Amino acid sequence: MISAVVIGRKKGTIPQPIRYGNMSATAIDSRPLPDARTPKVVDQHIIEIVSDSGEGAQTCGQMFGAICARSGHGVWTVEIIPAEIEPPSRSREGASGNRIRLGSKAVTNAGDHADLVVAFNEQVLYSRIDVDALRSGTLVFLDGTWAEHPMEEIRRSYAEAVRDFQTRGYVVIEVPIEQQCRKHTDEPRRGKNIWVLGMLCAIYDLEMDRVRGEVTRRFSKRSAALVEKNLALLEDGYQWALRNVEHRFHIPGRPATTPMVVMNGNQALGLGIMAAGMEVCSMYPITPATSASHFLASVFDRVGGFVHQAEDEIAAIGFAIGASYAGKTAATITSGPGLALKTEFLGLAVMAEVPLVVIVVQRGGPSTGLPTKIEQGDLLAALYGSPGDSPKIVIAPATIEECFHFMITARKLAEEFRGPVIVLTDANLATGQQPFPRPQLRESWLAAPPDQSEWDPNTPPFAWDLETGLSRRPIPGQRGGEYVLTGLAHDEASHVAYESRINQRAMEMRSRKLSVFRSSLKPPKVHGDAEGDLLVVGWGSTLGAIEEAVDRLRTEGHRVSCLHLRFLSPLEPGLKEIFARFRKVITVEINYSDEPGVPCVTPESRRYAQLAQVLRAYTLVDVDCWSRVPGSPIPPGMIQDALRRRLGSLGTEE
Amino acid sequence: MFELNDDWDLEPKSRVCLLEDYAGSEVRWCPGCGDHAVLSAVQRLARDKQLAPEKTVVVSGIGCSSRFPHYMSTYGFHGLHGRALPVACGIRSRRPDLDIFVVTGDGDCCAIGTAHWIHAIRYNMDLTILLLDNNIYGLTKNQTSPTTPFGWRSQTHPRGSFFASLNPIAVTLGIQNASFVAQTIDWCPPHLYATIRAAHEHKGASFVRIFQRCPHFTEDVFAQAREDPGRVLLMTHAQGIPLDAAVLKMFPNRAGHDPSNLAEARELACREDVCTIGLFYRNPGGSRYDEVTAQGLGKTPGEKLAAIEMALDGFMV
C-alpha cells in the first residue's frame, strides 16, 4: 500500500517518517493525481543532493542546476566533493553531490541552510549535518532501501539515523529510490541519480520536455539504449513524485531576454583564455585548478592552442615564460602549493619583464591543506611571495562571469605593463555554476601575432620611460632587437649590472608601472549608502554572500554598506576617503585571523586576515576583520550574525 | 657551355654574417676554461650555417657555462638555475622557425634541473642541448657536483666525495624517446665542432655532453685522457659524427659503433676504463612534441572567434 500522508510535527511529539509502503517498487498507475499537486510558490529554495561517490549525485545536481537555469531561474550551484575517487561506500567522508540554490531572481551565493535534501543513504546525510547545512524543518528525501537491507547492522544504523533525524526536526520522507530503479536497470546504483532528477523536476514543477532534452543530450553520445534507459528512469521518478509527494514548489522563473550561458568558474577561465587569444596554457595537475585545463584541453585545438602538461609546477611556469618570451603571452594555471613552487620563476618574470598570466585557483592551506575546499589564503603569497621586491599585478574576479572577462583583462595588463599578472580565484568559483549573459566576443580581445618587424637597434630592450617605467619588448625574430634576457640585475640594454646605481633605477622602473596602472583605476563602488556605521570590505568569491548579508542587515535598519575589491595590487584608489565616512571598516575573508580576545592574543599581537593586513598597511585605517576557514563558502547568515555582533560592540565602544 | 646545378645561386648574398657578428659581450670566463672552446665552436657553426642572429636563441640556466648567451649576439635567455630546458621547450612550442641552443652545466642539468632534463629528452623537441660538464660547481666556488669523481675533494666534501659519479650519457640513454646522444671533449676542437654540428642538424632533442675542465677546481680531472689518447675511445661509423683524417689520427683507439644500436650504445656508455667520444645513439624517427605544439599556428581571428562561439554554444541556457 502506498501512503502519501504527511504527518506534520505536533507539539511534544517526534514526527514519524513518511514512508511509502514497504520500499517495494510501484508501477506507474493510472489513479488521478492527488489534490495536493498544486505547488506552493516560493521565491527561493536551497536543494542538496548527496550520495556515495560514484552514484552520480553530482551529475544529477549539475543537470538539475542547468535545467533550472534554462527555465529562467537564478541559480548558484556548489559541488560537494570527497577527497578520494572511490571512498568507502556509506561513509560520511565519501559524500559527493551538489548544493543548488534556486531563486526567482539572480542568485549570487550558496545561501544558508538547505530547504530540501535528497540523500542516497543516511551516512552521507550526516556529512551535511556535520557542516550545519540543514535546519529544523528541512525536507529530507532519504532512500529507504536500507530499511530492508540484508545486513542487520545496516538496518539498525539506518533506523537509528532516521530517529535521530526526526529528533533534529527534519521532515524525513523515505523514498523507495532503489526499488523503483530496479524496474529499469540491473544496476540501480547507477540509475538513482536520473530517477532523483525526475523526482526533483516534479517537486519543483519543471517543464519536462526541457528535462528530457537535457537527458537525451547528455547520454546520446554514449548509446541510444542508454538514452532510453535514462528517460525511463527520469519518467518513473517524475511520475512517482507526482503521485506520492505532497511537497511541491513553484519558483517563478524569469526567462532571460538576452542569451545566457551557464558554466562553472573553471570553464569560464578556459573560455576566457581562448577569448583573450592566448594559445599556450601550461599546467601540472593540481586540485581545484585542473578542471580548467580539462575543459580547455577538450576545445583548445579549435583555436590553435594547446595545454602543456608539464613535469612539475616549476616547469609549467618556465614553459609559459618561454612561450611568452618568444611570442604571445601564455598562461599557467595552478593552486596554492603550485604557486609556492612557481615563486622563483614569478620573480624572473617580474625582473625580466615577461608578460605572463598566472591563474591561482585557491584551496585550503598551508601545505597540502584542504585540496578540494575553499579558502582565500593565497593573497599575501601572491602579493609578496617572491624574494626581493617583485611588484606585480594581482586581480581577483568575484563572479563566474568575471572569471571569463578577467582573462582578457589579464592578458592585456600583462602586455601593457610587461610582467606577470596573477589572477586569484578559488574553489568556490571553480566549481560553482551560475548563469550569466553570453559574452559578445570581440576580435580586439584576441592577441595580435608576435611582432616580427625590424627593431630599431638604437632602442634597448628595456628602454624604460623614466616617468612610467613602461617599455616595449623585442621578440625573437625581430632583427636588431637581439638581447639576452637575464634574471640578474640589468640595465636598459639587459647587460648585467655591476653598478649599484643601475639596480636602484631598475627597481624604481618596475615599481613605477604599478603606480601608473593604479592611476588609471577608478575608486570602487560602495554597495549601500556612502556613509554609515560599518563598511564591509571583501574580495573574490564572497561577493554574493557579503552583499546578501549586508542587504539583510540594512533591512533590519543597520547602517551597513560594503565594497568589493577586484584589483589587489595595485590597490584600487580612494579607499582612505571611502573608509573615512564609516565609523568602522571590517574585512570579511575566508582565511585565518585571530579572533580578538582569544587566549594570548593582544590587540598588538593579533594576526589579521590577509586583505585586512594589506588595507591597514596602505590606508593607516584601523581596519578590523572577521574571517573563518571552514573549507566551505561562508553562508550569508553567518556573515550577518558576525556583522551584527560587531555592530553591537560598536554601540558600546563609544 | 657550363651547366649550373639547380640549387646554385649566382646572386650575391645580400647578407653575410661573419664570426664577429655572433660575438656578444666581453667574455668573462677564466683563462683556460673549457667554455671558451665551446663558444668558439658554436659561433663557428652559426657562421658556417649562416644562422640569422635574430632567429637564433641561446637558453641557459645558472652557472659559469650558463653565462654563454651573453657572449653571443643572438637572442638569449639567461634564466634560473636548472630551468633552461622548460624555458627552451616553451620557446620552441610555437616557434618552429628559430634555432634554439640550450647551454647547461653539470650542476644545472644533473642536480637542480634533473626532472626537466629527463622530460625534455622525452618531449624530443628540436633543441641542441649542450651539457658543459666540468665535474664541479665553479661559479659558487668548488662544491661537489653529481658528476664529480668518487673521492674528489671539494669544499663541501673536504675528505672526498662519498658518491659514485652520475653518468649523464647512461641516464639519457635510459630515457624513452631519446633521439640523439653524443659525447665530446674540449681538447679536440675538430671533434667538438663536428659533434655540435651533427647535433644541430638533428631534428629533435640532441644531447651532447662535453668534457671540459675548470682551470681552478678540476684542472686535472681529465688529465689521464688528455695526456694519453689511448684512454680515449673514439666511436666511428658512417652514420656517426663525420670525422676528418686528423681526428682519426689523433685517436688510434676506436670502436665502430652503429648509432642505431641502442643496446651497444648503453654498453659503451657504461665503460669506465676509457673516455668514450662520438655518437652513441640517434633515432631520427622519434615522435616530436614540437610538431604537436605548433599545430594550429595559422588560425585566423575569424576561425578562432567561430571556434569560441561554438564552445560557448555548449553552455547556452
Image: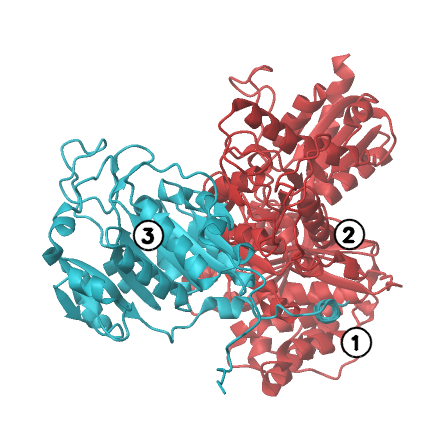
Chain colours: A red, B cyan
Examine the image and state in which quarter residue A472 appears.
top right
Q: Amino acid at mark 3?
A: Leu
Q: Is residue A468 left or right of residue A606?
A: right
Say which element carries label 2.
Answer: loop
Q: Quadrant of the C terminus of chain B?
A: bottom right
Say if residue B175 shows up in the picture.
Answer: no
| Residue matched to label 2 | A107
Q: Are marks 3 and 2 on the same chain?
A: no
Residue farthest to the top, as pictured: A654
Across and down, in percent, residue B47 comes to 45, 58
User: Height in image: A541 above or below A64?
Assistant: above
Residue occupied by mark 3: B131
Lateral position of residue A26 relative to residue A149, left or right: right
Name the amino acid, label 1.
Leu
* SS at circle 3: strand
How far apart are the two marked residues, 1 and 2, measured between alpha carbons? 33 Å
Contact, mark 3 vs mark 1 (Cβ under 8 Å) = no
Query: Residue under mark 2: which chain is it in?
Result: A
Asked which quadrant contains residue A557, the reply is top right
Q: Position of residue A201 (x, y in %)?
A: 73, 69
Vertical placement of A448 versus A590: above or below? below
